[in-house]
Each structure stands twice: as C-alpha cells, then as structure tokens.
Image (cartoon, rainbow, N blue to C red):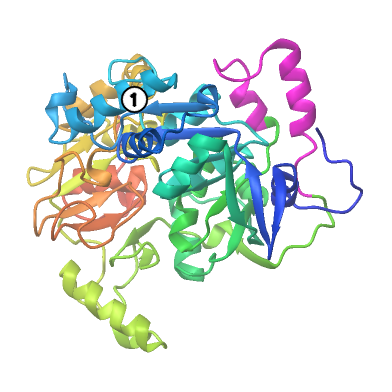
Amino acid sequence: MPPTTTEAKTLFENLWDSHVVRSLGENLDLLHVDRLLIHDLSGSRALTDLNERGLSVRNPELCLSMPDHSVSSLPGRTLASSPNGVRLGEALRDMSAAAGIPHYGIDHPNQGIVHIVGPETGFTLPGSLLVCGDSHTSTHGAMGALAWGIGSSELVHVLATQTIRQRRPGTMRITVDGELGDGVEAKDVILHIIGALGVAAGTGNAIEYAGTTIGAMSIEERLTICNLSIEFGARMGMVAPDDTTYAYLKGLPLAPQDEAWDRAETYWRSLPTDDDAVFDREETFRAEDIAPQITWGTSPGQTLPVNGIIPSPGSFVEAEMQYNAETALDYMGLQAGKTIAGTKVDRVFIGSCTNSRLIDLRRAAEVARGRQVAANVTAWVVPGSVQVKREAEAEGLHDIFLAAGFEWREPGCSQCVATNGEVVAPGERCVSTSNRNFVGRQGPKARTHLAGPAMAAAAAIAGEITDVRALAPTTGEG
C-alpha cells in the first residue's frame, strides 16, 4: 500500500519502511523479501544446505534461478563446454526443479546474467525488495527497487523464510545535472563519481542517484550506474521510478498486467523522494565535467580521463593511497607521468552485467562499423542474455562485429569473473566493460582496464587505449 504518513521521506525510506516485518532493535530490522534471484555459483550450494537442515523453500514462486557465472560463452555451447558448467549448472537445474523454483536453463529463451534478465523480464519491479547471492545486485535499484547482494548463510535464510535481517543504512544522494558530452556514457559517469569520491565514500549508505542527467538516461543506462554502487562501498544504489521506468516495464512477461498494472503504477508513483526530504549526505556533479574514463590501477576508483596522465604515488596525500598506487602501477606495468592513451592492449571484452545490454552493443557497434580489430587484439562481444542476443541479431549488430573481427558469443558472465575458464592470460592487458579490475579478477596476473562499450570498441580497433572521440568518422557498412 502507498505510504500514509505525511512525514517527508526519501525513496529509500519509503521502500525500507514498507518491508519491515519486525524491528529487532539497535537499528536492525527483519524485512520481507519480494524477489530472490539465484545463480549457479552460489545457488545449488544454498539449496543443498537447506535440504541438509530439513528445510524447504518458503515461496518458490518468488524466486528465479539461472546459470550465468559458470557457463561457457562459446558459440554452440553446452553445460559441458566449461570446466564448472556441468557440476554447477546441472545441480542448480535439478535442485530448482525439485524445489519448484522457475529456472531459465542454458537452452531457455530468457537465459542470461541474472542482473540482465531480472529487469528485462519484469521480475524486478519498482517498490520491491530484491536480493541475490551476488555483490552487484545493486543493479536492480535502477528500477526503483531496494536491492543488494547477500552472503551464503543469508541466502539460505531467505530461501527458508522469505525474510532477511538487515541493519538500516544511512542515506546519500548523488545528483548529476547537465548534458553529457560527445562520447561520454553512463559507465564514464559512475567511474568519474567513484574516482572523485573514493572507493569507501558510500560505505554504510543507500545511494539515490538524481538530477537531470540521470533523469534523461534510459533504464539500461541507469542499470549501469547502479551496478557499480558496490564499488564505492554502498550496498544499495537506486533511481526513483518515473515515466521512463513505467514505459520500460509495460507489457513485460513478469510485470503486472491490466488492472493489476494500474494498481501497481499508482503505488509506484507514491515512492519517489519528497522534495523536502533530508539525506545524511549529498554530493553534486556537473555532466560537462565528465570525460570518457579508463582505469589505470587495480580498483575502480583508480580512474582518469582517457586524455589524462597516469598519476604518481606521491600525488596522493594519504600513505595508504600512495602504497595502493605504487602496487597498482607495478602490477599493471604502467609508468607514472605517462599518458594513458597509447597503452597497447591484447584483449577487449564487451559484456558483463554492467555493459552487455542492447544499448551497450549498439554503441560498440557504432564504433566498430566499417573498421577492423587490430591484428594484435582478441576482441569478444558477449550479450547479457538470450533476449539481448536475439534483439541485437535482429538489428544486424552481430554482422557488424563479425565483419570487424570481433567474436560474437553466447550469453553469460564470461571474462568478467573468469569462473568458466574464459580468462585473460597472465600479463595480457584487457580493456573490459565489466565492473572490477581487481588483481587476478580476469585471470591470474591479468591486467584489466575498465571502460565503457564505445571506449572498449575503440581500443579494439586502435590496438591501444584511445579516446573514442578522436576516431575519424566512417561511413563503412557491416
């Protein structure tokens, strides 16, 4: 039901308060969970633990499972195409069936990465509380939902009770106003924010993104923004639902229909932050100050404009940040004081729950059209779901990528986390549209530079990190 209090509230407060089952004291609440997403990396283990304790799934109809982390993205793949695919994929499939949990298996027309499939099917809805055993569950907050990643014991608890205990976080609003410049994408916006505020700035807070820049973004772009909220310490990132949200959801298979839609939309419109609501912290950015970003280190916060200079450890005030910069430069094989542009790359990965939606593939294809991947580069495009792949192929985007020399692959997490054998080789340098550039994230001793889809495609074409804005226009067709 819509909130009845006249007290000014934030979006977060509206969502949280409506899900409290019981206050447990000391700022700790028991919350009702509306939606649970389950993937292969943690799902079968949680279901096994549940069975071993003699418990059953409380509300299987509120869950949705699918393999994404362990499956191969190889064209024509089966579960047996990756080292962990059979073990994890088959276990999740069989245990989901036994529990009555809907399952989008490897051959299902809606299979894909959980954080892509949830929004695109309408499983993720405004006003809902959604959790998943994956840190980037904050993605779903872009739909006006309250969403965060949970641990293995919490996953078992949610399966058994449809509730979760959670300490109430503080509130933070990040406002971005203005019009983005040429070549600047949503990924650049969130990397710029993390770089400016630091990787711990969101700790202890639920973050709402607002402002004219965010309001002008598509749902897919907002999903990218919220996806990286965890990368500067926040458990939750969210954008208030609006007409863009409702237009995106209307008619999706798992969204409310007919009269149920009318009732739901009325409720959703009551959720956005009141004009006079107060946040614990406010930060403001100007869109015109944001340039295409590229990370130089081993943290998403170690980012700079693509036309910038690699910083020296001595440029940081705090000793810890100096040490982090020094070790990052050593691992990445970079030299302070040099331009980041012109750094040679070996691989490009366009995919992951951050940037594998149709809008991302369109932007990468615009760069790739009529051009060729550099001879020294291996470049992959991995759609985030079967639906994204289907829609991209209907537009001919796969033909553009294939003609340019990219590999066009099947949906999954792929090289983002490298749990399926799809790794970047030791010492190789990869420009990736994923969300983490941690040491070894894409494979032992792999060197990862995070960027948006257009920047990644530009690096594949140039064979080096390059400013996508500097590419000469092309009228080539693919």
User: Residue 373 at x, y = what percent?
Assistant: 16, 39
- Write the residue at 34% across / 52% down: 451
Provide the residue designation for mark 1: 95
Q: Which quarter of the rendered picture does the N terminus lie within? A: top right
Taking the view exactly as shown, the residue that stands out farthest to the front is 54
Q: Is residue 247 magenta?
A: yes
Q: Which quarter of the rendered picture does the C terminus lie within? A: top left
Asked if residue 78 can be seen in this view, the reply is: yes
In terms of depth relative to the viewer, which is nearer, 319 or 264?
Answer: 264
Asked if residue 224 can be seen in this view, the reply is: no
Read off the magenta span. 244-273
Inspect the image, locate mark 1, and give the three-letter code of the amino acid beneath it.
Answer: Met
User: Residue 172 at x, y = what percent?
Assistant: 65, 62
- Write the residue at 28% across / 21% down: 106
> Residue 360 occupies which quadrant of the picture?
top left
SS at badge 1: helix
Is 435 rendered above or below residue 98?
below
Task: Check disc 1: other Cα within 10 Å, few if <14, some if 14-19, many if 20+.
Answer: some
> Residue 331 occupies which quadrant of the picture?
bottom left
Along the horizontal axis of the image, is 78 left or right of 105? left
